[in-house]
Image (cartoon, grey):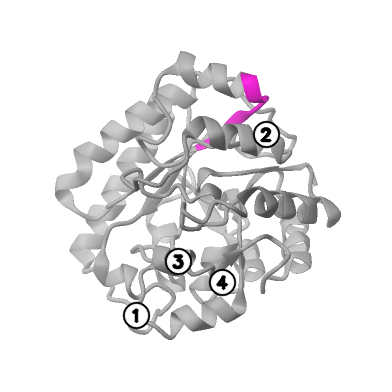
């Protein structure tokens, strides 16, 4: 396999740009480089500046490339449609101009990608990981979300040549098995791909290796996480939001948790996956003390089991 391991600002606790405790974006780039990563994601909209010269200079200074931008927002509300398209324009206009990562033989679409995640619903946030008690969208609401994702994907590809991938996310309206199956049925591969996240799969009660194989024909990009089982069991027993669970340490360095990375590596080999995988470990940004140890531990573990 020709697979390259990337990082993401969420490893530093960067998920909500309004959080006053976030590290400066230049510090994240510097530390990602020091930890041995070749590149990382842009992070949530509004975290890094959208100025090409500023971002390019800092990336070059640290020997980094951007593997993906993200839209992490309410994909359901009809009134949010124009905001989603504005974010698509601004993110894609930036990342398409940045120096590119190489494309590996067998990689379906060149990086960078646009990762699209639904977020912003209390009724689902408190039900993260609990399929049995998580409310589902009405058919009309679901079709509104499908329409928004299609519009994002068509704009990103037709205007900017950026591939959109749909990312099931704990606490959003695309999380559980039935929802993933439905969104894959409703949005064909010619419109958008799938980004399987091993940690979110496990959080939602699914085996990551099984789902990598199940949607091998749709997967264009992959995220890696690991989950501390004791912390996971503790947070599932509470009424708690997803990022509150992360602040309690539910995510841990790759190789130190419950996920079977030997099995995941075999699944990726079996499906012939090539290209880029991004490591994520969400945390409270005030818990920055262990970031460098954690991102290096994840990188070192993955190298030890055959990733590069």
Query: Which comes sooner in the sequence, label 4 or label 3?
Result: 3
In which quarter of the view is residue 267 placed?
bottom right
Residue 181's disc is 3
Disc 2 is placed on an element classified as helix
Query: Which comes sooner in the sequence, label 4 or label 2?
Result: 2
- Where residue 294 appears, as percent x and y from the top left, is 66, 54
Which residues make up the magenta segment? Answer: 61-68
- Where residue 148 appears, as percent x and y from the top left, is 28, 46
Seen in the picture, residue 168 relative to 47 is either above or below; the reply is below
Query: Which comes sooner in the sequence, label 4 or label 1?
Result: 4
Residue 239's disc is 1
Whether tag 1 and tag 2 are in contact, CB under 8 A, the answer is no
Judge depth for marks 3 and 1 and give the one in front. 1
Residue drawn at point x = 69 percent, y = 52 percent: 293
- Where residue 70 appears, as percent x and y from the top left, is 43, 41
The residues bearing labels 4 and 3 have C-alpha atoms spaced at a distance of 16 Å
Tell me if 160 is positioned left or right of 217 in this view: left
Q: Is residue 13 magenta?
A: no
Kindly identify which residue carries mark 4. Answer: 202
Q: Residues within 10 Å of mark 4 (few under 14, many from 20)?
A: some
Kindly identify which residue carries mark 2. Answer: 33
In which quarter of the view is residue 211 placed?
bottom right
Query: Which comes sooner in the sequence, label 3 or label 2?
Result: 2
- The quadrant of the picture occupied by the C terminus is top right
- Where residue 86 appears, as percent x and y from the top left, is 27, 32
The residues bearing labels 4 and 1 have C-alpha atoms spaced at a distance of 18 Å
Disc 3 is placed on an element classified as helix
Residue drawn at point x = 44 percent, y = 58 percent: 184
Judge depth for marks 4 and 2 and give the one in front. 2
The residues bearing labels 3 and 2 have C-alpha atoms spaced at a distance of 37 Å
């Amino acid at each position: 396999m020709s697979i390259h391991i990337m990082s993401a600002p969420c490893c530093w606790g960067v998920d909500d740009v309004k959080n006053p405790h976030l590290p400066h974006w230049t510090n994240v780039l510097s530390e990602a480089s020091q930890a041995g990563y070749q590149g990382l994601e842009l992070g949530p909209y509004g975290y890094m500046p959208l100025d090409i010269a500023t971002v390019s200079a800092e990336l070059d200074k640290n020997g980094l490339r951007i593997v993906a931008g993200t839209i992490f927002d309410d994909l359901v509300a009809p009134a949010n449609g124009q905001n989603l398209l504005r974010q698509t324009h601004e993110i894609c206009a930036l990342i398409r101009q940045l120096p590119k990562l190489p494309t590996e033989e067998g990689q379906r679409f060149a990086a960078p990608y646009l990762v699209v995640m639904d977020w912003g619903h209390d009724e689902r946030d408190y039900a993260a990981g609990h399929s049995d008690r998580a409310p589902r969208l009405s058919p009309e609401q679901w079709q509104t979300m499908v329409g928004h994702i299609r519009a994002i994907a068509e704009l990103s590809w037709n205007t900017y040549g950026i591939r959109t991938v749909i990312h099931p996310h704990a606490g959003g309206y695309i999380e559980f098995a039935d929802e993933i199956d439905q969104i894959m049925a409703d949005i064909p591969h010619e419109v958008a791909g799938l980004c399987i996240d091993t940690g979110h799969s496990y959080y939602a009660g699914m085996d990551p290796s099984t789902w990598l194989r199940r949607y091998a024909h749709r997967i264009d990009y992959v995220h890696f996480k690991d989950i501390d089982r004791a912390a996971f069991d503790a947070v599932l027993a509470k009424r708690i939001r997803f990022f509150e669970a992360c602040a309690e340490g539910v995510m841990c360095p790759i190789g130190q948790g419950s996920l079977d990375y030997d099995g995941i590596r075999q699944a990726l080999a079996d499906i012939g996956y090539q290209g880029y995988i991004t490591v994520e470990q969400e945390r409270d940004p005030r818990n920055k003390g262990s970031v460098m140890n954690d991102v290096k531990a994840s990188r070192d573990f993955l190298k030890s089991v055959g990733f590069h």
